[in-house]
Image (spheres, helix red, strand yellow):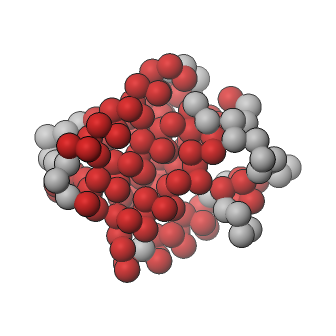
């Protein structure tokens, strides 16, 4: 069953499924952030929170706070690639609130990896749950 691309919110069950993919994408980028800000745990905490959301152990409210924390980390880190990873993480965990945030993960992956992004973007597209492919990618 395909998902309505025009619905930016989606039902919570869909968001719980989709957040697994978005956070998998960010976990692959996390070493970039960790090398620039090794003592900043906000992204890892947000990713752990997203897992709890997916398991129905955490509600949307705390997830929004995690997303805000990721964006604060992006503002504070002095490395453009790490900033992009933090922004990707903020978008990924914000899927708990609104599924449309999933569409931003690829954009921040490009910013984080630059010319080396192709294989990572291919991995993301290959691993998005099939029923969300058209939802996430406008060209699908």
List x then y, in percent, for residue 35.
17, 56
Q: Is residue 104 left or right of residue 88?
A: right
List x then y, in percent, for residue 61.
50, 19
Q: Residue furthest left?
A: 39
Q: Is residue 77 above or below residue 137?
A: above
Residue at point 43%, 59% (across, down): 108
Q: Foreground: 53 or 87?
A: 87
Q: Is residue 90 above or below residue 125?
A: above
Q: Is residue 13 above or below residue 140?
A: above
Can residue 6 be seen at all in this image of the molecule?
A: yes
Q: Foreground: 140 or 76?
A: 76
Q: Is residue 121 above or below residue 63?
A: below
Residue at point 33%, 48% (across, down): 86
**Image quarter for residue 76?**
top left
User: For the image shown, how many numbered marks are present on the structure?
Assistant: 0
Q: Is residue 24 left or right of residue 38?
A: right
List x then y, in percent, for residue 11.
73, 31
Residue at point 49%, 62% (across, down): 107
Residue at point 33%, 32% (across, down): 69
């Amino acid at each position: 069953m395909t998902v309505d691309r025009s619905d930016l919110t989606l039902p919570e069950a869909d968001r719980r499924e989709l957040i697994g993919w978005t956070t998998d994408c960010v976990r692959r980028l996390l070493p970039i952030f960790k090398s620039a800000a090794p003592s900043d745990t906000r992204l890892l905490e947000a990713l752990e929170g997203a897992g709890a959301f997916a398991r129905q152990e955490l509600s949307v409210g705390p997830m929004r706070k995690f997303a805000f924390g990721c964006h604060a980390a992006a503002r504070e880190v002095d490395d453009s690639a790490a900033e992009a990873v933090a922004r990707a993480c903020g978008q990924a965990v914000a899927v708990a609130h609104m599924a449309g945030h999933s569409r931003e993960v690829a954009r921040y992956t490009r910013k984080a990896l630059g010319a080396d992004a192709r294989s990572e973007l291919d991995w993301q597209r290959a691993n998005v749950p099939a029923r969300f492919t058209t939802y996430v990618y406008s060209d699908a």
